[in-house]
Amino acid sequence: MKFVKFFLEKFVKFFLEKFSSEVDALTDVGVVRKPYPLVGSQTLSRSPLTKTVSNQHAKQYHSKRVFKVIILGDAGVGKTCLSFRFCNGRFPAQTEATIGVDFRERSVIIDSELIRIQLWDTAGQERYRHSIVSHYYRNVNAVVFVYDITCPSSFRSLSSWIGECHKYSVSANNDTPHILIGNKCDLKCEDRVKTDLAQMFADQNDMALFETSALVDSEADHVESIFMTLVHKLQQSKPMHVQSDAERAQKEERLLLKADEAAKLAEEQGWCC
């Protein structure tokens, strides 16, 4: 198991360093430069003009905008489960620690416009992050900070995650929409993070606070609303890069070819058994 993790870490590092330009091409959207009001609970409602579209139906749209949203937080807080719930509509059948980058995408239609949301989730453990972190922060359009309500240490770590954003030129301010999610609100725990304390931290860092659960099906609409509220804020932003289907297809094809080349080279260099 340790060997598999070592190989995956090496492969991700090699792939991102060698072909980062191709990865950037898929998210070449620029940083939003428009101030946004905080996301309030009163806006948490699903728009009748918003719907999810399949890849097949997405082809009928001649242009689309792509938004890159990164999810930050300690290992085990539920970052992957939240992104899975939003993109797949359910809790994952199996959960494992993220090694490298976990990438998901969902397409939605807002006001007759096709919007692609790319959710990037990296390993919360430092040993899996150091080799890919600089690539992770490129061309970011929004940031989601996550902590575990039942784990105070994950809440205390939020300051370091915000500091990392600043370090890699992703300002946690109104230029880049950002929210704070307290996950696992369904669990009972005496040593849980108090809502008023979390709200104070959110106010100090100019973020909206949401408490939810990626696990409980009754919270599914709430998770949906949290992310869709963020998407609506991004959808209103201008200017943004608009990709045609042909452009995206070409870039995705090049990226897949590069991935195959990286896998072959990794095997030649003895990274796998």
Image (cartoon, grey):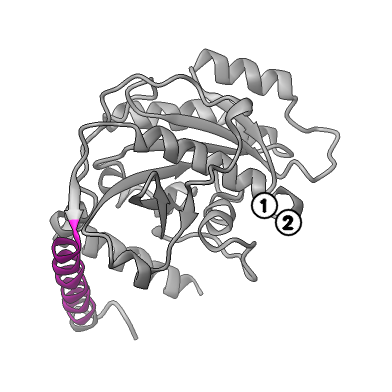
Q: Is residue 120 visible?
A: no
Residue displayed at 43% across by 74% down: 3
Which amino acid, mark 1? Ala
Mark 2 packing: few (<14 Cα in 10 Å), some, or many (20+)? some
Q: Which secondary structure class fits the magenta region best?
A: helix
Quadrant of residue 171 within the rendered picture: top left
Name the residue tied to disc 1.
Answer: 220
Q: Is residue 186 magenta?
A: no
Q: Which of 243 and 273 lies nearest the eye of the viewer?
A: 243
Res 267 seen here: yes
Quarter location, residue 111: top left
**Residue 39 relative to residue 263: left or right:** right
**How many callouts does the rendering have?**
2
Q: CA distance from mark 2 to mark 1?
A: 5 Å
Q: Position of residue 260 (x, y in %)?
A: 21, 79
Query: Which element is circle 2 on?
Result: helix
Residues rendered magenta in the picture? 244-265
Q: Quadrant of the C terminus?
A: bottom left
Image location of residue 218, percent across then percent down: 76, 51
Residue 128 screen position, x and y as percent: 41, 54
Q: Nearer the viewer, residue 169 or 60?
A: 60
